[in-house]
Amino acid sequence: MSGWLISLWAAPAALGFALLFNAPPRALWAAAILAVIGRLLRDAVMHAGIDITLGTLIAALAIGALAELWAKRARLVAPVFAISAAIPMVPGVSMYEAVHALMKLSGLTAGQSGEAYLVDAGSSAVRAAMILLALAIGIAMPALLMRRR
């Protein structure tokens, strides 16, 4: 499946979470569009050879900034758009890999080395944590910089 088609699937995910968070109907399209923009931007940055963490930060900054602009226009709060749009970029695969490696580690018998599983679990967990941190910083930073005091 091509990259842009996968990015389009971010829209239904964002719509689902926006509905779950009881977002007003006029905010649904904005959340879906911001999710697709963020996912396309992250994929483009990664295609250029940049790490997924930095790509996620750049995409989250774009989502946060566009959500602030859209919120002023729609007279809503920006997190209504931004949180729902960022959820499709949550690193579920990295979290799964970390837990899967820990489960393999717990199933070892005495005398077997679990060093490789421990390294896999640690690296996957750190990658997932860094991506989540990039999402949080990327969404919060535009709100802190763009809002009037």
Image (spheres, helix red, strand yellow):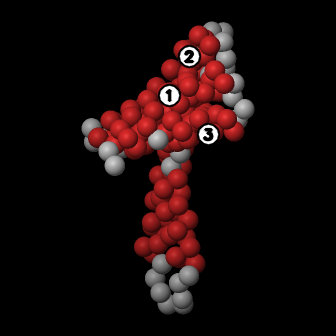
Q: Residue at x 58, y 78 (%)?
A: 106
Give amino acid for label 2.
Answer: Trp
Q: Residue at x 64, y 34 (%)?
A: 18
Question: In this figure, which residue is indicated by the disc labeled 1?
Answer: 34
Q: How crowded is mark 1: few (under 14 residues within 10 Å), some or many (20 or more)?
A: many
Rendered location of residue 42, percent (x, y): 39, 37
Give amino acid for label 1.
Answer: Leu
* Above or below 66: residue 93: below
Return the mark for residue 16. 3
* Above or below 118: residue 125: above
**Splitting the image into 4 quarters, where does residue 82 fall?**
top right
Label 1, label 2: how far apart the Cα atoms are: 10 Å
* Above or below 26: residue 130: below
Please say if the residues under marks 1 and 2 sit with CB atoms less than 8 Å apart: yes
Rendered location of residue 39, percent (x, y): 43, 36
- In which quadrant is the C terminus drawn? top right
